Image (spheres, rainbow, N blue to C red):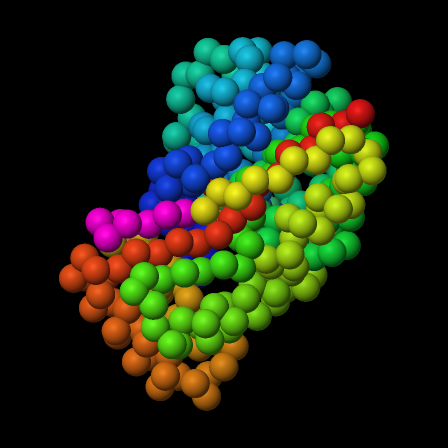
């Protein structure tokens, strides 16, 4: 899970779709029916998971712009484009750190992103809030990591790993220093004066059978923690071996916290 490979995005997609806030999607649907909501920009679209989740929720006649800077993911996403009679879909290759305002169509009705905000800096979040305001667009940002990681059964070293992972989350992910677990609340506060802002939780609730997903996450936590504090390699390695054993034995559960955020302009 250290990079955004298509294999990682495929593995997480069913868990992402199960975790998304239905309450926020219903509120968005009410808004979309009352306003003409046709032009939709998905920021950091990857292979298109967010569109696959949302296009069946929204009224037909949607025109999607999937904005992504990784040509390999764009190719994988194009191969997954289904014949969706409800929507027209096109990829736009752009680096959102530099080209946010130009990559998004001028007449956008809905800005959306999935698992992107925690990579963003404070300055970029301000640009995104400014864009929603200036285009009078709604915004749905789902699955922003909120910093909470809870393993069951617990281990005294879990908290240390979560702290190191969160420190890693706040390094530069291409947008300047990332805001990690604070990002969704920061954006919500920036938009609060300009319309309706609704927040909801959307955790992954991984059960003992979800071994591959737990293993992939474990691998990511271990790599991130080791990068931040290489001198703790021995403790991290010991923790990793214990966790792996429990996952393989079907005795491990994992809850990873996310926040979904919906902004509806006045
Ligand atoms: C965690 S993945 C989520 C992908 C997809 N939204 C999903 O839910 O499956 C983050 C995505 O943002 C893209 N991304 C990261 N930085 C970007 C940038 N500066 N410009 C455009 N896309 C970016 C990555 O390539 C990746 O596809």
Q: Toward the viewer: 2 or 181? A: 181
Q: Quadrant of residue 129?
A: top right
The answer to whether residue 190 is seen in the rendering is yes
x%, y% of residue 211? 25, 54
x%, y% of residue 165? 50, 68
Q: Is residue 186 above or below residue 242?
A: above
Q: Quadrant of residue 108?
A: top right
Q: Toward the viewer: 127 or 79? A: 127
x%, y% of residue 243? 28, 69
Query: Image point 40% across, 71% down: which residue?
Result: 158
Q: Is residue 93 above or below residue 174?
A: above
Q: Toward the viewer: 197 or 39? A: 197
- Left of 202 or right of it: where is 95? right
Query: Image point 55% across, 13% down: which residue?
Result: 59
Query: Image point 73% across, 31% down: which residue?
Result: 196
Q: Toward the viewer: 219 or 6? A: 219
x%, y% of residue 203? 45, 47
Tell me where the magenta segment starts and ends, as one range: 204-210
Q: Given the current orientation, which residue lies at the most extreme bottom position?
A: 231
Query: Image point 50% across, 34% down: which residue?
Result: 21
- Left of 26 or right of it: where is 56? left
């Amino acid at each position: 899970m250290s990079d955004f490979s298509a294999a990682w995005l495929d593995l997480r997609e069913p868990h992402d779709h199960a975790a998304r806030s239905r309450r926020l999607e219903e509120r968005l649907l009410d808004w979309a029916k009352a306003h003409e909501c046709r032009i939709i920009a998905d920021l950091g679209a990857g292979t298109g998971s967010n569109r696959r989740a949302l296009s069946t929720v929204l009224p037909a006649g949607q025109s999607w712009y999937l904005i992504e800077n990784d040509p390999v993911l764009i190719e994988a996403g194009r191969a997954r484009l289904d014949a969706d009679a409800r929507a027209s879909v096109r990829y736009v290759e752009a680096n959102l750190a530099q080209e946010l305002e130009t990559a998004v169509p001028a007449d956008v009705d809905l800005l959306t992103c999935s698992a992107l905000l925690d990579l963003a800096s404070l300055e970029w979040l301000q640009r995104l809030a400014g864009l929603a305001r200036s285009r009078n667009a709604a915004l749905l940002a789902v699955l922003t990591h909120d910093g909470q990681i809870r393993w069951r059964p617990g281990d005294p070293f879990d908290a240390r790993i979560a702290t190191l992972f969160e420190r890693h989350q706040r390094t530069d992910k291409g947008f300047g220093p990332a805001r990690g677990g604070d990002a969704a609340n920061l954006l919500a506060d920036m938009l609060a004066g300009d319309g309706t802002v609704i927040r909801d939780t959307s955790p992954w609730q991984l059960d003992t059978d979800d071994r591959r997903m737990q293993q992939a996450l474990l691998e990511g936590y271990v790599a991130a923690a080791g990068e931040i504090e290489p001198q703790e390699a021995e403790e991290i390695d010991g923790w990793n071996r214990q966790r792996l054993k429990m996952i393989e034995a079907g005795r491990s559960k994992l809850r990873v916290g996310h926040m979904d955020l919906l902004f509806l302009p006045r």
